[in-house]
Amino acid sequence: MIILFGVFIRYDEESDAHWVEFKREHNITSDIENDFYFRYPSFQDVHVMIFVGFGFLMTFLKRYSFGGVGFNFLIAAFGLQWALLMQGWFHSLDPATGKIYIGVESLINADFCCAGSLIAYGALLGKVSPVQLMVVTLFGVTLFAVEEYIILTLLHCRDAGGSMVIHAFGGYYGLAISWVLYRPNLHQSKRLNGSVYHSDVFAMIGTLFLWMFWPSFNSAITDHGDGQHRAAINTYLALASSVLTTVAISSMSQKTGKLDMVHIQNATLAGGVAMGTAAEFMITPYGSLIVGFCTGIISTFGYLYITPFLEKYLKLQDTCGVHNLHALPGMLGGFIGAIVAAAATESVYSAEGLINVFDFEGSFANRGVGTQGGFQAAGTCVAIAFGLVGGAIVGLILRIPIWGDPADDNCYDDEVYWEVPEDEESIPPVLEYNNHMIHKHQDISESNFSSNPQK
């Protein structure tokens, strides 16, 4: 990394010491015009989401909280360095000097780029080694940079909050890897694949950080002015709406009417995911509420019915249920964006507004809204295809038996990769003893009490 940064990466004109001259030459009156003061609050919020939000959301397993938050920290810190390079090569490489110029927006984009791999980690949580996660991130960031270039630059889609490029891609990428790495004997770790009271509280911290800052996430790289303002409002409303439907469906699904913490931790965020593409469009405030309403229902049903179905029939083990929080709502978000774009009219946006929102400039000056809608839908399909095909290939690489992944009876357990303090006995010893007895009952009856003399 040090060598690559030394060769390629430099400060851009807004973070370079030549800013004083740049300001004079471009008639900029005040330092407040520097992009830093505009983007940095968004950057802080996104950064908190990546490290605190995603990290703590994954601490829900009773014996895998170190791994959830610690490996999240590791791969995000590794991924953002590689992302600055990969995205730089694709988006901001100066042909004259062969250098990449980075500023505060590059940092936000690098964080976004990591998000794809962190989502994929959710599907693999507890079943892979840290080295495998580094491989997932290396390829994940690379694939992300390529699909993002295709979708945003070549197809000219709009995707401010990344429903397509981040969530649909990251979700299907993780699911494909998990499918290839299927463990038929994972039931040997079943006793650890669940939460305890305090681990669910920790996971809820992650949920609330993500929930609070999602409007920043969806608006972080939108256009200055109305685009950013609108994206924040739309996301805020969709999130609020998805909480209500999640609670309603979660309660309805139980005969006793009780709530399930898994739904509250995850499906409440689905509105933010599905709003990612359409956030900067004129979807109207009630439109945002409808998006949140629908995705809250769909995501909760996903946890109730789709995840068990995938595990049983498609042999797909998805620890965190990323299919229901990222993959499915991300795909829906992409298609919602396509519909809203195709339905855009001059009376709603104004002629200049249409050009501004959809960037109908340069070689895309003659593109109509219907065509734009078609390309938005195509972009969603590209993201999903990259996720599934890329994930399958990465999964095959991870099946080579050199990565030190945990055994089937050692999954979801921090003991494998961390120094765990002795006194932390979260599983009561009696229950543990009973559990072992259940498994060993067969062996005992065969060996000790067998009349067969050979034994």
Image: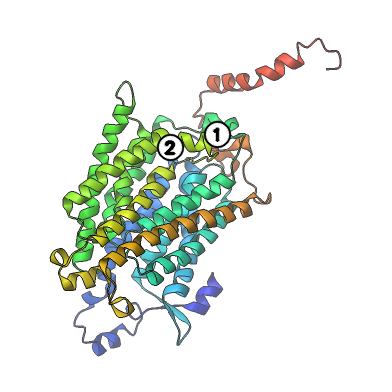
- Could you say whether the residue bearing mark 2 is in a helix, strand or loop? helix
Q: Which mark is drawn over residue 422?
A: 1
Q: Amino acid at mark 1?
A: Glu
Q: CA distance from mark 1 to mark 2?
A: 38 Å
Q: Within 10 Å of the Cα at label 1, are there few (<14), some (14-19), or many (20+) other Cα atoms?
A: few
Above/below status of 177 relative to 35: above
Asked whether the viewer can see residue 281, the reply is yes
Which residue lies at the image location 42% right of the left edge and 74% below the top edge? 91
The quadrant of the image that shows the N terminus is bottom right
User: Is 347 located above or below residue 332 in the figure?
Assistant: below
Q: Nearer the viewer, mark 1 or mark 2?
A: 2
Left or right? Give the position of 212 relative to 97: left
Q: Residue furthest right?
A: 454
Q: Residue shown at 45%/55% (left/top)?
A: 384
In the image, 388 versus 427, the foreground residue is 388
Q: Residue sitting at 27 percent across and 62 percent down?
A: 41
Residue receiving disc 2? 306
Measured as percent of width and height from the top left, residue 212 is found at 27, 49
